[in-house]
Amino acid sequence: MGIKLRFVEQYVVAAAILLAVVIVLLGGGAEGVVLCNTDTTKMSLCRPAVTGKNPPPPTEACCAVARHADLACLCKYKSVLPALGIDPKRAIALPAKCGRTTPPQCKGN
């Protein structure tokens, strides 16, 4: 029963984070939520670099966000990225483009 409870807890956390990110993206992001040491309103600075067919390189402002983020923590939520129109492969490649090492747990499926 512990495994089922843990799955439900992870699902609820992921759903809450997805909702917070959607509210920020759709509502203009007046106030963000701190997630993995990052204000969710600032995450939108990296959106152009991880969406579309030919995204531009990350800006310095995006890289500043990436340098302060807890990447291992953010990797826990990579499964919700497609629902936000974000390419997980591009999101996982972003830290390296900003001079950071991508955590090993981010590289798996």
Image: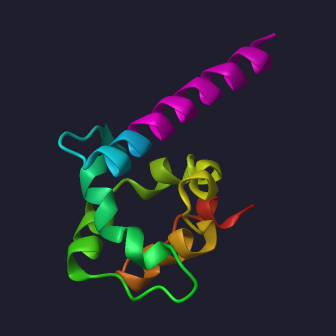
Query: Most extreme residue toward the right, as rendered?
Result: 1
Q: Is residue 25 visible?
A: yes
On screen, residue 11 versus residue 86, left or right, reads: right
Q: Is residue 39 visible?
A: no
Residue in the picture at 55% in, 75% down? 90
- Callout count: 0
Residue in the picture at 50% in, 40% down? 18
Residue in the picture at 46% in, 35% down? 19
Q: How is the image coloured?
A: rainbow
In which quadrant of the rendered view does residue 88 lie? bottom right
Residue 105 image offset from top left, x and y in percent:
62, 58
Residue 29 image offset from top left, x and y in percent:
24, 47
Image quadrant where one finds the N terminus: top right
In which quadrant of the rendered view does residue 99 lie? bottom left
Magenta portion: prevailing SS class: helix
The magenta segment is: 1-20
Q: Nearer the viewer, residue 59 or 25?
A: 25
Residue in the picture at 65% in, 67% down? 107
Residue 98 image offset from top left, x and y in percent:
35, 80
| Magenta-colored stretch includes residue 47 | no
From this view, report whether residue 76 is shown above or below residue 54.
above
In which quadrant of the rendered view does residue 86 lie? bottom right
Image quadrant where one finds the C terminus: bottom right
